[in-house]
Structure formats: C-alpha cells, structure tokens
Image (tube, grey):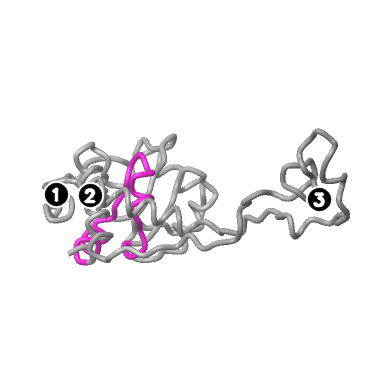
Amino acid sequence: MEVKLVDVKGKATSASMILADEVFGIEPNNHAIYLDVKQHLANRRQGTHKSKERAEISGSTRKIKKQKGTGGARAGSVKSGTRVGGGRIFGPRPRNYHFKLNIKLKRLARKSAFAYKAQHDGLIVLDSFNMAEAKTKSFKAVLEGLKLQDEKVLFILAEATDNVYLAARNLSKVKVVTADSFNTYDILNAKKVVLVKEAVEKIENILN
C-alpha cells in the first residue's frame, strides 16, 4: 500500500512510502479488536468501589417488634437491607478487573485497527516532525496545516520527544505516543492517526 508523505504544513511532498500489507492491509478481525479494547478499559478500572453491608452498619441489634401477632412481616434488625438506612444487599466490593490476552491476539488487534484506518482514509504519514521549542501555539499551527484542529488526533512518534509532548499535553483532543507504546483503543478512538515516517518502520517491526 503506497501513501504520499506530507509535511507539517499539510502539503504533499514528492516522496511516497510503501506501507506493509502484513500490518496495514490485512482483513480486520473484529473479535480481536473487541477483546483488546475490553482488556484496555478493564485494566484502567481502579476497582475500589465499596458499599456497606449489613454487618458494617452502625445501629442497635435489638429486635424491632415481636415475632408474631402484628399482622406484618418478621423484622429482626434495623440493619436489614430491606429497611431504610440498612445495609446494601449484595453490594459492590473491591476487586481487580485485570485480565490477560495472548501477545499474538494483541498484535492482530493492532494490525486490524491500523487496517481500518488505512481503509477509511484515517492515516497521515509525515516525512518528519520536530519542534524546536515546547509551545502549544506551534503545535496548533501544525494541526491547522493538517486541517485537524477540530478532530481527535493520535500522533505516533518514532521516539519520545519532550518538546512535542509538552506542546501537546494541554490539547484535550490530541494524544502523543511513541511507536512502542500505542494501543488499539487509542488508534480507534482517534479520528486521524498521524504517523512519522520513522515510526512506521518501527511499528512494522514490532507487529511482525
């Protein structure tokens, strides 16, 4: 698959690049994507939810009324979950939501996510991307040049660059990651994925 390289002003250059069909041209596997995104969202959960149950409620232990002869249901404690102010019946408890997936399945999911973007014109490949200073104004100028100022954008760099990260961190719709730290959720959550030319080579090596 051949794509034209563009500069930071959004203009097409004379150069082009071949994207590996083994990564960007496969038939997307929806179930692999589902499992990888499910794992990502589950692993982000803190799992600290907790409600008080019957044994944890403060209150008297006396029997509220006599067992028989009232014409109503039996009532033995003000802590009962059926009464106002009582404990929660089968309430949430702290738990760990993490689960594991095979590395081959995760690779397939990420290939599938890239393939979806490639099929639906969601990829932009830059010939180079460097920032001399960490200014958000400069980063916004790049987004305007690429006509992405109002879109959710994922930038994938070949290696960590402090100036780029610092310039983009105040932009709510922009996320900057490196070629060895992206995930399926970030790829699909972005309207456009902007790849630096060097990052493409690293991604292909990692996923193959």
Local packing at callout 2 (Cα closer than 10 Å; few below 14, some 14-19, many 20+) is: many
Residue 183: give x, y in percent of width and height. Answer: 35, 56
Q: Name the residue under label 2.
A: 112
Q: Is residue 30 depicted above or below 104 in this figure?
A: above
Q: Are marks 1 and 3 in contact (CB under 8 Å)?
A: no
Residue 178: quadrant of the picture:
bottom left
Q: In this view, does 175 lie to the left or right of 50?
A: left
Q: Nearer the viewer, residue 86 or 77?
A: 77
Residue 150: give x, y in percent of width and height. Answer: 44, 34
Whole-Å distance between the Cαs marked 1 and 2?
7 Å
Q: Are marks 2 and 3 in contact (CB under 8 Å)?
A: no
Q: Mark 1 points at which residue?
A: 26
Q: Do the residues labelled 1 and 2 touch (CB within 8 Å)?
A: yes
- The residues colored magenta run 179-205
Q: Mark 3 points at which residue?
A: 77
- Closer to the chain start, of discs 1 and 3, is 1
- Residue type highlighted by circle 2: Ser
- Closer to the chain start, of discs 2 and 3, is 3
Q: In this view, does 166 lie to the left or right of 192?
A: right
Q: Is residue 150 depicted above or below 52 in this figure?
A: above
Residue 133 in view of the camera: no
Q: Does the magenta stretch include residue 202?
A: yes
Residue 203 in view of the camera: yes
Residue drawn where x is 44% and y is 59% of the image: 132
